[in-house]
Image: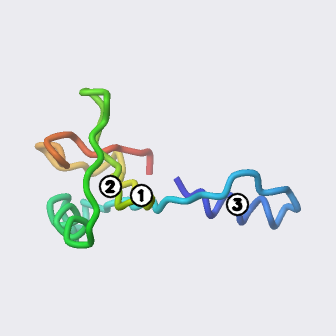
């Protein structure tokens, strides 16, 4: 999460940046009620992105792709809705936040 921020801190510290990030990370703050997983899914599909299926049937959903572009979607591990939020019939990837 936050590859660009890590690069910025490395540059400020005078370190060489070794791997530029090429994706966008989004954390849904579902506890605010301002956006839902289905609304995000619909918006990204309207923009031409599709949910990338994982080869692991137990893995959470998180990655949308459009050509070489990718957006990773996550939710905070607190305040998660019951029943769980779903993207493509899978729970959304959770991160400590």
Sequence-first tag of 2 and 1:
2
How far apart are the alpha carbons under marks 2 and 1?
A: 6 Å
- The x and y percentages for residue 88 are 16, 46
Residue labelled with disc 1: 70
Disc 3 element: helix
- The x and y percentages for residue 58 are 26, 27
Label number found at residue 27: none
Decide which of 79, 62 is in the foreground and name it.
Answer: 62
Label number found at residue 7: 3
Taking the image as shown, residue 14 lies to the left or right of residue 74, namely right
Label number found at residue 64: 2
Q: Marks 2 and 3: which is nearer the front?
A: 2
Work out which residue is located at the far right of the displayed protein and give it: 14
How far apart are the alpha carbons under marks 3 and 1?
A: 19 Å
CB atoms of marks 2 and 3 within 8 Å: no
Residue 23 lies, with reference to residue 63, above or below; the image says below
Taking the image as shown, residue 72 lies to the left or right of residue 29, namely right
Crowding at label 3, few (<14), some or many (≥20) Cα neighbours within 10 Å?
A: some
Crowding at label 1, few (<14), some or many (≥20) Cα neighbours within 10 Å?
A: some
User: Residue shown at 30%/46% (left/top)?
Assistant: 52
Quadrant of residue 12 within the rendered picture: bottom right
Sequence-first tag of 3 and 1:
3
């Amino acid at each position: 999460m936050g590859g660009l921020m890590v690069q910025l801190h490395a540059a400020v510290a005078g370190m060489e940046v070794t791997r530029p990030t090429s994706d966008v990370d989004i954390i849904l703050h579902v506890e605010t009620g301002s956006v839902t997983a289905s609304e995000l899914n619909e918006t990204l599909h309207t923009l031409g992105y599709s949910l990338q299926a994982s080869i692991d049937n137990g893995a959470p959903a998180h990655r949308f792709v459009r050509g070489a572009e990718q957006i990773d979607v996550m939710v905070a591990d607190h305040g998660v809705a019951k029943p769980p939020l779903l993207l493509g019939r899978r729970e959304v990837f959770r991160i400590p936040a």
